[in-house]
Image (cartoon, rainbow, N blue to C red):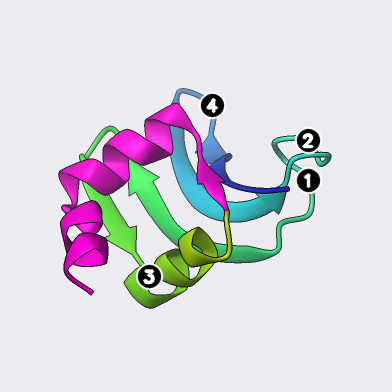
Amino acid sequence: MVKLRLKRCGRKQRAIYRIVAIDVRFRREGRDLRKVGFYDPIKNQTYLNVPVILYFLEKGAQPTRIVHDILRKAELFKERASS
């Protein structure tokens, strides 16, 4: 099963997160299938590769709770419902 989840990057006390599609059997810092965006909680910046995220969601990938909230704030689910 594939999940969309956060992968921690950056340095100590200055974390940024990559949003990745990853197999549930791999650990958080493990090998990912594809990088689909990033999230910086300090600057509150988000970059999302929307076509790739929609592709993984259509194939059955489950976003984690935090990633789901990020996608909802970006109104990605409204785009998915209209297409």
Q: Secondary structure at mark 1?
A: loop
Query: Amino acid under label 1?
Result: Gly
* Residue in view at x 54 percent, y 44 percent: 62
Give the spatial CA distance, label 2 vs label 3: 23 Å
On the image, which quarter does residue 78 sit in?
bottom left
Residue under pointer 3: 49
Distance in Å between CA atoms under marks 4 and 3: 26 Å
Mark 4–mark 3 contact, CB under 8 Å?
Answer: no
Q: Nearer the viewer, mark 1 or mark 4?
A: 1
The kind of residue on which mark 4 rests is Lys
> Which is more N-terminal, label 1 or label 3?
1
Q: Residue at x 33, y 70 (%)?
A: 50
**Inter-mark Cα distance, 2 to 4:** 19 Å
* Chain part drawn in magenta: 61-83
Report how far apart the C-alphas of labels 1 and 4 lie in the structure: 19 Å
The first of marks 1 and 4 along the sequence is 4
N-terminal of the pair, mark 2 or mark 3, is 2
Residue 57: image tag: none
Q: Residue at the top extreme? A: 13
Within 10 angstroms of label 3, few (less than 14), some, or many (20 or more) residues?
Answer: few
Dots 1, 4 in contact, CB < 8 A: no
Helix, strand or loop for disc 2? loop
| Percent of width and height locating residue 46 | 27, 52
